[in-house]
Amino acid sequence: MFWDCNLNSTKDNFVVVEFFPLSIGTVSDAEIACGGQCVSCETWQNERRVLRKKHLKDVHLQQVSVRRFASFNLFSIEDQNTEEETGTWVQYRSIFYPKYSVSLRFHNGLLNVKDVLTSFDNTGNVCLWPSEEVLAYYCLKHNEIFRDLAVCELGGGMTCLAGLMVAISADVKEVLLTDGNEKAIKNVNEIITRNQNAGVFKAQKVSSCILRWDNETDVSQLEGHFDIVMCADCLFLDQYRASLVDAIKRLLQPSGKAMVFAPLRGNTLNQFCNLAEKAGFSIQRHENYDEHISNFHSKLKNEEKDTYEENLHYPFLLILTKQR
Ligand SMILES: C[S@@+](CC[C@H](N)C(=O)[O-])C[C@H]1O[C@@H](n2cnc3c(N)ncnc32)[C@H](O)[C@@H]1O
């Protein structure tokens, strides 16, 4: 079993579902790892059905709380003591490049059950996933590659941390932060405003929008616009994998490149590579792309056997280049 979940009904009909990602894995992990086919996912589907029924009875006070995930020790988090109804502001600082930090707002760990059950994929509102942090770190480390370029992050979740790191550290022309989830992008808009007011951006233009890979209008209006498209942990959704490949291809200008970080998650990374090759990309696949990450990965494998699962947590790096 990858995960466990507690369904608690209080006297106020307050339903709290708690997932335990750190020690046992997350619901998302379980679903992601197997594409929804395993026993855990069946159980999750059943829980969803239970929730849906409960939800119909009582729509107000149902929330899902989700705990934070293990990481590669790349960023420090300082509380800014500004808690809002929707979330908490923190200062996210690179441990390796400490002059770079941004204000981020995390949803307060509580997701409305209505959102979870009825809205578009919410995995980007649950937490900031390790692949995103690794992509963000990698962008800081190699920020010279973005000079004068137009960069787009796809599926950046509620923070789009990697795109923000490009925007604060690189002499980049333009950074567009995107996700298909409306709630995530509302949060990203506020993050941009706060950091813009703090004057931290080096980029000439930083903006955000809802961009769904499977939405013709979203993709066509930005066709051929970007030199670099990047994403983290976006390869697991069976129904959107082909549209992600297609969106990357169309958004990139002819000599553009995509930078993709994602864990294996079963066969999902391989399936993405197969589709990308069929779409005319050449792919460089890197398992060891950074000394710190490789060393930390070995340490986690040895010392955190109960919590660290390579298949779910270790991001590979894929560089996609358009061939035709
Ligand atoms: C596992 S989350 C990763 C979020 C973020 N990159 C991170 O690693 O923290 C996957 C993200 O892909 C987004 N997503 C899923 N399907 C999508 C689609 N068809 N179009 C656009 N975004 C999508 C979700 O909204 C979510 O934010």
Image (cartoon, helix red, strand yellow):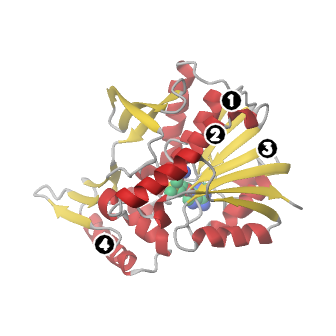
Query: Which numbered disc, 4 or 1, marks the residue that appears first in the sequence?
Result: 4
Q: Which residue is mark 3?
A: 227
Query: Which numbered disc, 3 or 1, marks the residue that appears first in the sequence?
Result: 1
Query: Which numbered disc, 3 or 2, marks the residue that appears first in the sequence?
Result: 2
Q: Quadrant of residue 168?
A: top right
Question: Which is nearer the eye, 280 or 145?
Answer: 145
For label 3, count other residues whose C-alpha is less than 10 Å away and answer few (under 14), some (14-19) or many (20+).
Answer: some
- Residue type at numbered disc 2: Cys
Query: Which numbered disc, 4 or 3, marks the residue that appears first in the sequence?
Result: 4
Q: Residue at x 43, y 63 (%)?
A: 118
Q: Nearer the viewer, mark 3 or mark 1?
A: 1
- What numbered label is drawn on residue 155? none
Ligand 1 under 8 Å from disc 4 Cβ: no
For the residues marked 4 and 3, what is the alpha-carbon distance in whole angstroms? Answer: 43 Å
Q: Which residue is mark 4?
A: 47
Q: Residue at x 43, y 53 (%)?
A: 299
For the residues marked 2 and 4, what is the alpha-carbon distance in whole angstroms? Answer: 39 Å
For the residues marked 4 and 1, what is the alpha-carbon distance in whole angstroms? Answer: 45 Å
- What numbered label is drawn on residue 170? 1
Q: Nearer the viewer, mark 4 or mark 1?
A: 1
Residue 135 is at least partly visible in this image: yes
Q: Which residue is mark 2?
A: 139
- Residue type at numbered disc 4: Glu
- Residue type at numbered disc 1: Ala
